[in-house]
Image: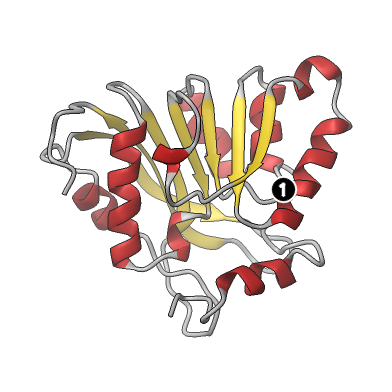
């Protein structure tokens, strides 16, 4: 059983029948600030891209981006938004239906992975798996950019907190990572006040380190 019931695919298919609350018309402000501070290198993989707002913002900044999501309706929306862009910008974006929990299986290569509200959808075992997948995906010097809720709400179908301590533990030097940024932030939505969040940049420092 996931945090989103026995059929998370059906849950998110339902969400995308309308505009999801996390679609704010662009990149989250905390991620914009993070990108200005630690400029991502392309090609970039956007995991759990949803309807594409983050990938579109990165493409407008001149980056080549692949966005992946397991919700076909979300990817269709993202492709429609990309089609409305100038041709030179649209050519930088590729949206695919794929399992974002397994980035090592997505045709790359990638120098950066960006995550706007993806990791916080999962419990500890799946987060551990995803960290191993990131280690197998990114080369030395490759970076993972994260924005996630820093609190857990006691309601069904809600994300679980990703704390600063968790980031530093999961992406440790022993596991072949260097934490470049890890700090409090806010996660915005269309329907509620901003939620306390954690934002981080971690860099792959030793591809030969253990992946456990």
Residue 58 position within the rendered picture, expressed as x and y whole percent measured from the top left: 64, 28
Location of residue 184 with respect to 179 vertically, above or below:
below
Q: Is residue 181 visible?
A: no
- Examine the image and state in which quarter residue 103 appears: top left
- Examine the image and state in which quarter residue 30 appears: top right
Query: Quick one: quadrant of the N terminus?
Result: bottom left
Residue sitting at x 61%, y 68%: 9
Other-residue count near label 1 (Cα within 10 Å), few / some / many at <14 / 14–19 / ≥20: many
Residue 11 position within the rendered picture, expressed as x and y whole percent measured from the top left: 64, 74
Residue sitting at x 42%, y 47%: 102
In the displayed image of the protein, which residue is found farthest to the bottom? Answer: 155
Residue sitting at x 49%, y 69%: 159
Q: Is residue 179 visible?
A: yes
Q: How many marks?
A: 1
Residue sitting at x 44%, y 39%: 105
Residue 28 position within the rendered picture, expressed as x and y whole percent measured from the top left: 61, 45
Location of residue 159 with respect to 83 vertically, above or below:
below
Residue 23 position within the rendered picture, expressed as x and y whole percent measured from the top left: 72, 54
Query: Would you name the residue on which mark 1 appears?
Result: 75
Identify which residue, 172 or 123, lies in the foreground.
123
- Examine the image and state in which quarter residue 152 appears: bottom left
Q: Relative to 93, is 133 on the left or the right?
A: left
């Amino acid at each position: 059983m996931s945090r989103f019931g026995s059929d998370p695919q059906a849950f998110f298919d339902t969400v995308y029948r309308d505009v999801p609350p996390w679609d704010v018309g662009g990149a989250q402000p905390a991620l914009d600030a993070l990108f200005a501070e630690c400029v991502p290198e392309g090609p970039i993989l956007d995991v759990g891209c949803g309807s594409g707002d983050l990938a579109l913002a990165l493409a407008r900044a001149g980056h080549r981006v692949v966005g992946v999501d397991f919700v076909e309706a979300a990817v269709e929306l993202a492709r429609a938004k990309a089609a409305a862009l100038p041709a030179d910008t649209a050519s930088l974006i590729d949206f695919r239906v794929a399992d974002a929990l397994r980035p090592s299986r997505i045709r790359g290569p990638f120098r950066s992975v960006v995550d706007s509200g993806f990791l916080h959808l999962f419990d500890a075992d799946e987060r551990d798996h995803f960290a191993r997948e990131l280690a197998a995906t990114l080369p030395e010097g490759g970076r993972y950019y994260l924005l996630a809720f820093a609190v857990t709400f006691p309601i069904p179908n809600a994300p679980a907190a990703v704390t600063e301590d968790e980031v530093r533990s999961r992406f440790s030097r022993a596991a072949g990572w260097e934490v470049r940024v890890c700090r409090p932030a806010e996660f915005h939505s269309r329907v509620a006040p901003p939620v306390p969040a954690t934002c981080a940049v971690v860099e792959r420092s030793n591809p030969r380190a253990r992946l456990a």
